[in-house]
Amino acid sequence: MIRYLHLSDLHLTSKESKGPVEAFNQNVVTHSMVEMIRESEFDADFVVITGDIARMGRPEEYAVCEVFCSQLLDALKLEKDRLFLV
């Protein structure tokens, strides 16, 4: 059986792009998601992220995306080659 995690339209942003309140709220959601995955020992063979990963496509937003993806893969105990962005 193949198991995967599919996330879509994250629209991740940075404080510089959106503002401190929105960036904080996003952090609460993304951090909670990663911690839930880590604590539940969720098991997946790969991750697919589709749709808009960044809100406005700014470099600082993609830096946030990179951190999120890294933490997500760490929680899932997967290597970078198990992440697919569409």
Image (cartoon, helix red, strand yellow):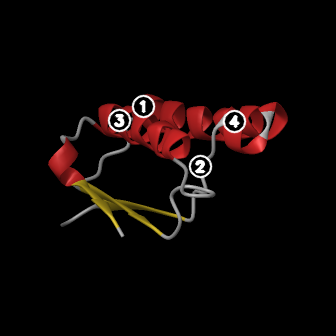
Q: Can you tell which mark lies on residue 70? A: 3
Relative height, residue 9 to residue 39 (above, below): below
Give the structural element (helix, strand or loop) at label 3.
helix
User: Residue shown at 53%/35% (left/top)?
Assistant: 36
Measured Cα–Cα span from mark 4 to mark 2: 12 Å
State the residue lying farthest toward the right.
21
The amino acid sitting under disc 4 is Glu
Mark toward the start of the polypeptide (1 vs 2): 2
Give the structural element (helix, strand or loop) at label 2.
loop
**Mark 4 crowdedness (10 Å alpha carbons): few <14, some 14-19, many ≥20:** few
Give the structural element (helix, strand or loop) at label 1.
helix
**Mark 3 crowdedness (10 Å alpha carbons): few <14, some 14-19, many ≥20:** some
Mark toward the start of the polypeptide (3 vs 2): 2
Viewer-nearest of discs 4 and 3: 4
Q: Quadrant of residue 45?
A: bottom left
Q: Is residue 60 left or right of residue 28?
A: left
Give the structural element (helix, strand or loop) at label 4.
helix
Viewer-nearest of discs 3 and 2: 2
Relative height, residue 7 to residue 42 (above, below): below
* Relative image position of residue 38 (x, y in whole percent): 42, 31
Relative height, residue 59 to residue 38 (above, below): below
* Relative image position of residue 51 (x, y in whole percent): 50, 70
**Mark 2 crowdedness (10 Å alpha carbons): few <14, some 14-19, many ≥20:** many
Name the residue carrying label 2.
12
The amino acid sitting under disc 3 is Ser
User: Residue shown at 28%/52% (left/top)?
Assistant: 44
Q: Is residue 66 left or right of residue 35?
A: left
Mark toward the start of the polypeptide (3 vs 1): 1
Viewer-nearest of discs 1 and 2: 2
Viewer-nearest of discs 4 and 2: 4
The amino acid sitting under disc 2 is Leu
